[in-house]
Amino acid sequence: MTVLEQTVAAIRPADPVALAAARAHQDSLTKPRGALGVLEEVAVRLAGAAAVSPPPLPVPAALAIFAADHGVHAQGVSPWPQEVTVQMVANFLAGGAVANAIAAQIGASVTVVDVGVAADLPPAPGLTVSKVAYGTADLSCGPAMTARQVVAALETGIEVARRLVDQGARCLVTGDMGIANTTASAALICAFTGLDAAGVTGRGTGIDDETLSRKIEVVRRALRVNGLDGGVENGSETPERARAATGGAVPALETLAAVGGLEHAAIAGFILGGAALRVPVILDGVIAGSAALAAAALAPGVVDHCVAGHRSAEPGHGAALDHLGLRPLVDLELRLGEGSGGLLAHPLVCAAVRVMHEVATFDSAGVTDKEA
């Protein structure tokens, strides 16, 4: 079996016994039932994912920023030059980015992975070079990646997840960097949800109305030339195909190769890798959301191991989360990427689990519960 096949085969949905135990434990704590709202749902979700209640504390956290470039940049979908990808990678490695600051606040490690930057990067502490290609092809003219490339990128993400967990991480946070990657995200979201490009394509790092109109048309053209304009089958609609032999649904792999980015594929693998190890994965913004759609199409059970860190300002992100059935913890109109929103949500996830471990029950505290 390949690394991808092994990983998909190892993923299990939430454990029903642990879910029931976690719900019962929540109801026994010295607080009104349901008083912690979504935090209770998070704690129960993590118990089901870990197959034990209370679930392990999700510390320490590890952020992996997957960096890659996109051939579709040539279509004028972003005002930023492609060289910014390389420059931001250097900024991450120097500790000067927003993601670095927030990671330091919560004590998370930061790993930068070159999975497809269109330049050779010098060795540096914190950098993993796993370059599959020097960027993707232009998705609006045909497939962005070959079948070999998409599998290699997926397996890169899996290997990074495995390594970080081996090094002690108990929570993984997705991060990304790649100029024009919101265009690929919009195309993926359209393909996996069947929604129109106008409703899921946003302004990314900031574009004017003219550029937004062009970006929407580029997404539509990408779907059309790749035969995806009618939507594709996905894990939630046809799970039997998502469990197909050869490591997952062929439609999912083909879709990811057609309109995804190398970092999208690597993040999908990162999510799969964390789920296979029963380590929770906090998703960041629209890039992670679109990658999670691909991961869920390959292995539907992967969703039970994910937490939506936040809802970004990109319209496609909300659509992706709705399709996945995930509720974001933070809504601050963020549109940065890098893992920033996922990192900000980590303390909330920790608090949800700590309540399960440290809050007394009505019986142990000698507090009278309300009458049933």
Image (spheres, grey):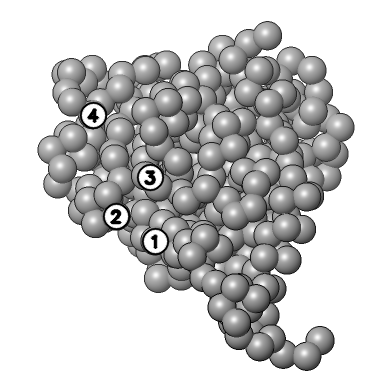
Viewer-proximal residue among 276 and 290:
276
Cα distance, mark 1 to mark 2? 7 Å
Q: Nearer the viewer, residue 165 or 154?
A: 165
Residue 16 - label: none
Which image quadrant for residue 245? top right
Which three-letter amino acid code belongs to the residue tagged 1? Pro
Vertical side of 16 occupied by 159: above or below: above
Of marks 3 and 4, which one's residue comes earlier in the chain?
3
Q: Which residue is mark 4?
A: 126
Task: Looking at the image, tell me whether mark 4 or mark 1 is earlier in sequence order.
Answer: 4
Hey, what amino acid is under mark 3?
Ala
Mark 4 or 1: the one toward you:
1
| Labels 1 and 2 touching (C-beta < 8 A) | yes
Q: CA distance from mark 3 to mark 4?
A: 15 Å
Element under disc 3: strand
- 91 left or right, relative to 291: left
Tags 3 and 2 touching, CB below 8 Å = yes
Q: Which residue is mark 1?
A: 347
Q: Earlier in the sequence, mark 1 or mark 2?
A: 2
Q: Is 346 positioned to the left or the right of 353 in the image?
A: left
Q: Nearer the viewer, residue 258 or 340?
A: 340
- Taking the spot 37% from the left edge, 17% from the top edge, the residue there is 131
Label 4: few (<14), some or many (≥20) within 10 Å?
some
Looking at the image, residue 139 lies above or below residue 130: below
Q: Is residue 86 visible?
A: yes
Q: Is residue 369 above or below residue 81?
A: below
Q: Amino acid at mark 4?
A: Gly
- Whether residue 244 sits left or right of residue 330 in the image: it is right
